[in-house]
Amino acid sequence: MANMTSETCRVTVVAPTGWIEVAVPSDVPVADLLPVLVQQAGDHAAEEGLDHSGWVLQRLGEEPLDEDRTPAALGLLDGDTLYLRPRDAGLPALEFDDVVDGVSAGVRSRPARWRESTTRWMFLGLVAVTLATALAVLLSAPLPAAERAAAAALIEITLLAAAAGMSRAFADTAAGVLLGAAALPDAALAGALAVRLAEPAGSGGLGAPHLAAASASVAGAAFLAMLGTGAAGPLFLAAGGVGVAGTAGGILEIATRLDAPRSAAVVATVALTLAPVVPVTGFRLARMRLPILPRTPEELQQDLEPVASSTLLDRAAVADHYMIALSAAIGTVAAACMTLLPRQDGWETAAMLPAICAALMLRSRVMSGAWARLTVILPACFGLALYVVHWVRDRPAAAGAVLTLLVALTGLFLVGAERMPGKRLLPYWGRAADLAESAVSIALPMLMLAVLHGYGWARAFGD
């Protein structure tokens, strides 16, 4: 069986005077392997290379191999055939004498071909579309709330049971995760409609009780889906985290009589306060632990047992997935809270929204993973765009100036796209970002108290 991850790669090298079969190391550059292969190709091959600028290796119909890359990086497989050719007389590219044959070969070589696995994913996609259509019917059907709530709850329970069955009984993790994830919006709808049943007839609109019930249902369904499928723990953990945050926000609004913007300010502040513990939490959830720093000479001899590389690398990948999920949960909660903040007038909310965006942006710099960084950068960009739109809505005369500034920012970002990749920043920029993050972390609770009118209450209490 072809293997690219083994330590050696067995290839056939066809030279001008014959051919050899050789096992080459997969992690050694071609430039270091080439002299040995030339020596094996013939007694006078090295001297002959002086007459034509040396030798190169190439596959049939392809360009010469990059000598700075390793066989593993080049995708060489066991059983591949390579041709040892003079550098200035390489093998020509393939030519087709039949246009239809050439087109067929080109189509077959493309990676995005329809395969058996594609058919399976198509049907799983149809499952998702069907379930989304059923949810849309429940949302829009002119039926009594009791009937819609019962139908949503029945679909939720059925999907959770089917998810567990597909994952456990049929070992189809992908289908199980899909069904478990599809149960979450039905759980939210069932929870919100259950509250509607207890309300007086004719009451309309959604409020804190509906949010609390829907979020609690999502958190519970995510927990059951994670247990039932035994897979996609980070996905369901993120959904459960968002559900817990929504439940806390709804209960806070009900218990304290706060309005939605003030409750959102509290929830966003708490969520961003938890952001620094995301790496440690992901590390723990992956069942990894760092050794304790030794304090005595005897402790230097403890925890010396090596860990298998495969085990450690697998756990590191799991930890990264958990960090992405937790960061996504925090970013989602922050984005939802930022949509509510502009509903309240005053300088407090006008200052808190960009402060939340700044906290997310500054937190992203410590994340090395692309997906983890995007989970906080995208909500920050959303919040800034929301802030600009609401600011211009209250000040129509400034629309022209804002549009001019946005066009200028577009140009600056284009320049950054060309110059910033690969550029090393001076150390004091990192230190400045650390200080800025500390300042924003201190400012957020203070702004939250301002949104809650806590300072006015303290002054009134003092008087």
Image (tube, rainbow, N blue to C red):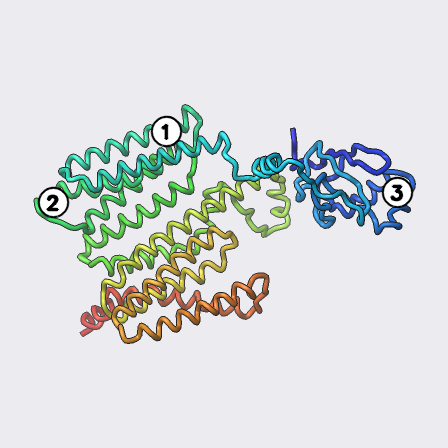
Name the quadrant containing residue 191.
Answer: top left
Q: What distance separates the C-alpha of mark 1 from that of mark 2? A: 34 Å
Q: Nearer the viewer, residue 329 or 276?
A: 329
Which residue is denoted by mark 1 in the rendering? Answer: 164
Q: Secondary structure at mark 2?
A: loop
Q: Secondary structure at mark 1?
A: helix
* Apparent side of residue 138 relative to residue 201 in the rendered image (left or right): right
- The kind of residue tagged 3 is Ala
Q: What distance separates the C-alpha of mark 3 from that of mark 2? A: 91 Å
Q: What distance separates the C-alpha of mark 1 from that of mark 3? A: 64 Å
Name the quadrant containing residue 99.
Answer: top right
Q: Which of the marked residues, 1 or 2, is nearer the chain's N terminus? A: 1
Please tell me how crowded label 1 is: few (under 14), some (14-19), or many (20+) other residues with Cα within 10 Å: many
Q: Which of the marked residues, 3 or 2, is nearer the chain's N terminus? A: 3
- The kind of residue tagged 2 is Glu
* Apparent side of residue 238 relative to residue 279 in the rendered image (left or right): left
Q: Nearer the viewer, residue 460 or 1?
A: 1
Please tell me how crowded label 2 is: few (under 14), some (14-19), or many (20+) other residues with Cα within 10 Å: few
Residue 199's tag is 2
On the image, the x and y values in percent for residue 437 come to 44, 65
Residue 45's tag is 3
